[in-house]
Amino acid sequence: MDDQIIELKEDVSSSPLYSKDFAPVPRDQRTWNTWNFASIWVGMAVCIPTYMIASSLISSGMNWWQAMLTILLGNCIVLVPMILNAHVGTKYGIPLPVFLRLSFGIRGSVLASLFRGLVACGWFGIQTWIGGSAIYQLLLVMAPHMADSLYLGDFIGLNLAQAGCFILFWLMNMYIVFKGMNSIKWLESWAAPILLLMGLAMLGWAWNEVGSLSEILQASYLLSDQSDIRFWKIFWPGLTAMVGFWATLSLNIPDFTRYAKRQKDQIYGQALGLPLTMILYSFIGIAVTSATLIIYDEAIWDPVALLAKFDTPIIVIVSMLGLTIATLSTNIAANVVAPANSIANINPSKISYKLGGYITGIIGILIFPWKLLADPSGYIFKWLIAYSALLGALAGIMICDYFIIRKTKVVLAELFKVNSIYKKWNPIAWIAFTFAILPTIPGFLVVVEVVPAELIPAFLVNLYSYAWFVTFGLSFLIYYLLAPKQSG
């Protein structure tokens, strides 16, 4: 890929679609190098969901190396649209909402970016609650009586100390939003080596306690209660879930790569940071959990629950601080930038990135994330997994439009004009989007138990296991067939 950087040569600052936050990043402000992008991925990938990600695969019937292979393959696959969508950010210096104006239309981009942004609002609340819980557990080590603090009633469902820790962690997130995008680069670069060392320390503890890595891996076969499951039956839905794990970031990666010095920085940084960190930290999760079977005679998947087993306060304190840093670094990069920009895109001249971030924070409180996590139906997680179908459809259209139809050529100033050569709504994109997701809807309705499985053909139910691949491929193909003569 070329390292050409296109800068805005026309004054469009009076347009309501223009803002300083959405303006193409000038060359002299491109300061992110390969290490910055690698550290971004270390900071995002080192989190509790990554630590626990292999659990669903192993409990479904895979062994440890099959789970590792599935995770590695899924992340290598999602790395492709990640790097492709990142190209426009580096070349033109624009964030996702502006990029979407190209394929979905000047006004249509608002709806398209909200598809990406709103799910991040939910994840922001959930991760903020996890971070607040880590602080709460840390304080309980030093002041156990805080568990008896004032109960705030059934509507809130928390005691005063829990609520205070949640708000404290929320304020930490909002402070990073206030400081701007460069503070994210600083946070991730600083946190990355610490988080990797903490993960390796947990692996070292497990290895030391058991005495043999081979014995630990052998114990992993006891983590599954499924002995007669065929590998290929669980491989494809597992692979789709692994792709869906970062399918969100594969869309809004231009929000970060617009600060890249060169295309090589974002390509090498992401290629080094994403798959390697995911496979390493997932392996640590499997190894440590398998070790708990030997050490405690029970499998402890949740690292917070595991840390509660330690009797040494200093270990708990250091670990909980690390967990707080890990959750903060993941939350800011993965769950704040996208919704902040999506909300700002509703009215760029009046809603700034910071205001969008503050609105995201308010939504994160209002959804009561501790109650979402306590929902035994698990519907929220079924919905989040299903979301990969929508994200796949968006990605297919974006990549086809930018690389195949326009051959990476964009009239930059036109993306900021109300009366632009790019339509307000691009019907071809929305037709491709709609028809791409239609085949996955029956399977989704069965999974969330809205429609009985016997009423839906087995083929459509099984098709849902490939949701991201189906919608990506269909949207790409339909858009290509309907819009072969578009030009930038």
Image (cartoon, grey):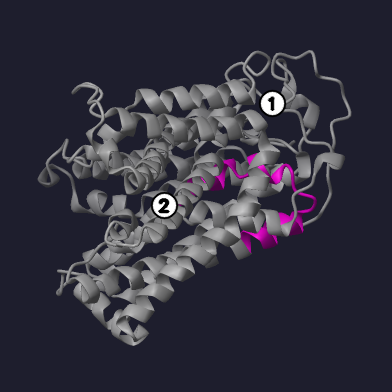
Q: Which label belongs to residue 320?
A: 2
Vertical side of 35 occupied by 371: above or below: above
Vertical side of 245 occupied by 129: above or below: above
For the N terminus, the image quarter is bottom right
Identify the residue at horizontal 45%, vertical 62% (top origin).
74
Disc 2 is placed on an element classified as helix
- Front residue of 218 and 242: 218
Q: Amino acid at mark 1?
A: Tyr
Q: Amino acid at mark 2?
A: Met
Is 20 left or right of 217, judged from the image as shown? right
- Front residue of 326 and 102: 326
Is 363 left or right of 476, judged from the image as shown? left
Q: In the rendering, at what x and y percent does residue 472 appear?
A: 47, 48
Q: Mark 1 sits on what residue?
A: 422
Question: What whole-number distance in Å separates the C-alpha atoms at marks 2 and 1?
Answer: 50 Å
The residue range painted magenta reads: 244-271
Q: In the rendering, at what x and y percent does residue 330 appear?
A: 50, 47
- Front residue of 480 and 141: 141
- Front residue of 100 and 276: 276
Identify the residue at horizontal 86%, vertical 20% (top origin).
11
The question of residue 477 being in magenta is answered with no
Mark positioned earlier in the residue sequence (2 or 1): 2
Question: Residue 38's image quarter?
Answer: bottom right
Disc 1 is placed on an element classified as loop
Is 269 left or right of 172, judged from the image as shown? right
Q: How many marks?
A: 2
